[in-house]
Image (tube, grey):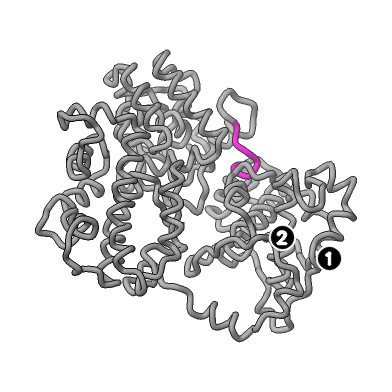
Amino acid sequence: MAQEGTRWWENRVLRSVDNLRLWRENPRLDPSSQPVKVRDYVEELISDVNDKQDFIDLLTSIANRGFVSFDPVVVWQDEDDKYFYVAEGNRRVMALKLLRSPEKSPISIRKIVNKLSREIDRDVIEKIKVCVSPNYEDARWYILQRHSNASTQVRWQRLQQQRFIITVYDSTGQDIDETIKLTGFKRASIIEALRYVKIRDIATRREVTQYLSVDEKELVYSHRINMTVLERWFGNSQVRDAWYIEFNDAGVVINANLNDFYIAYAKFLKLMLNKDNELGIMVNTRTIDSNFQDIFEYLPQVRPASDDGKDSIASEKPIKDDNKPEVKPDSGVRTGSDIHNEDPEKDNEKESKPPLKGNPNRGQLTDLYHEIKVRSYKIRALFEELQKLPLRKYPNVSAASIRIFLELSVDEFINNCDLQLDVAKRAKKSYNEVTLSQKLSILRGKLIGDKEADKIIDQLLHNSNDFSLNTLNEYVHGTKVHKVERQFLNRFWDMLMPLLSILISFKEI
């Protein structure tokens, strides 16, 4: 309960932007993400195209007009580590941090941030006025008041609001009455959140996303997924009966054969996410009502779970299985008969032996646990080929590819950040004449903006290291045939990954 007698939200004090910490549990972020650096937070925030443009507009406004805080930035001080965490105003604080240190921005917007940063006096935005909440509970109370009523800030999407309700619910030991008291929401709203966030989270499971395209998966992962459509579909008693879904006050239990359920759910998502789908009817709240039977009959049938109950999903089960990799999407959703004709013993064997993450004995340089986000067709195509190329059979091709992939990534970073002229000026030659070694040396430090990446560059530039640029150059230009063992190449690739994550948004999934 807020300490209303203090009216802390009316008082503002100066705090350094650099000393404010972003809130990892911010409902605007996907809870499965684990942001550590400012770049991580921003990348998650702008993963949606609309959110990205909104954030760029915010950066532009601050750069052109200065920081005008009509809506207060609210922070609380953690009792254990004494840091100030941002409860309200994370987007604005992120923008200020990037304008002060543009090297911390994601590659996709770094060129814009660099330009805007040059247009503002960074010292002017070093400190801002904030409201300091006595504790996290009071800050949470304030957030609920702001986002449950009309206000001028960017409103939460329905999924974001529902997630915040669940955060409060969990903090009360899953006490609905206490959650009602803290949030002001009705019992029905809290139970709805428990049910439908669970249903949406099932959509992000590997067993469902393996049937979706890359674009479809991004929409499913996004907080902008249309929760109202999911609520309308799964709220239908005919769907719940046919798909063996049980609603209760604690959430939802799926008592179906899971293979059948995942396939039917994936196919429903395809209809929901694509205007031009196989059925010819885009699923939305209107068509669910007007074309329900057509949609329902188009989807595969779902059988009940086996008698031992091992197939069912209960609300308390974890949402993700982090021990299994993402499976590449099929050309389409398989029917139930396709699944039933497969050899179950082979399926069990595959599931019991998932590939190990970071295994130096793996068969390819990179695996299905990683993905890249890059505009360059050449880099994306090379990455996809390296996911398939067998190291044991093609060690020399793989070794040379590491060198090529690194240089392409460095060039992509320089181009995205509009640093060609800067690099050429520092190297005192035209950009096309600058060597990879010189590019890395110039990027090291403020231009790359990451300490771990700097350490990797140091290793690459030290010729006595095994994992050095000299070794990579030997793969392409030299005559030696050493250091092409599978374990060595895999370790070299793993050593480069933190640097690649900065250069081209190379991420673990």
> Disc 1 designates what residue?
241
Three-letter code for the amino acid on which mark 1 is drawn? Asp
In the picture, the quarter occupied by the N terminus is top right
Element class at badge 2? helix
Element class at badge 1? helix
- In this orientation, does residue 176 appear? no
Q: Does residue 361 lie above or below 434 as drawn?
A: below
> Disc 2 designates what residue?
265
Q: Which residue is outermost to the left?
A: 464
In front here: 51 or 468? 468
Three-letter code for the amino acid on which mark 2 is drawn? Tyr
Give the spatial CA distance, label 2 vs label 1: 14 Å
In front here: 380 or 240? 380
Which quarter of the picture shows residue 421? top left
Residue stretch in magenta = 155-160
Q: Is residue 52 left or right of residue 441?
A: right
Q: Examine the structure image and report whether residue 253 is included in the region drawn in magenta.
A: no
Question: Where is residue 72 drawn, in percent x and y?
Answer: 47, 24
The mark lying in front, picked from 2 and 1, is: 2
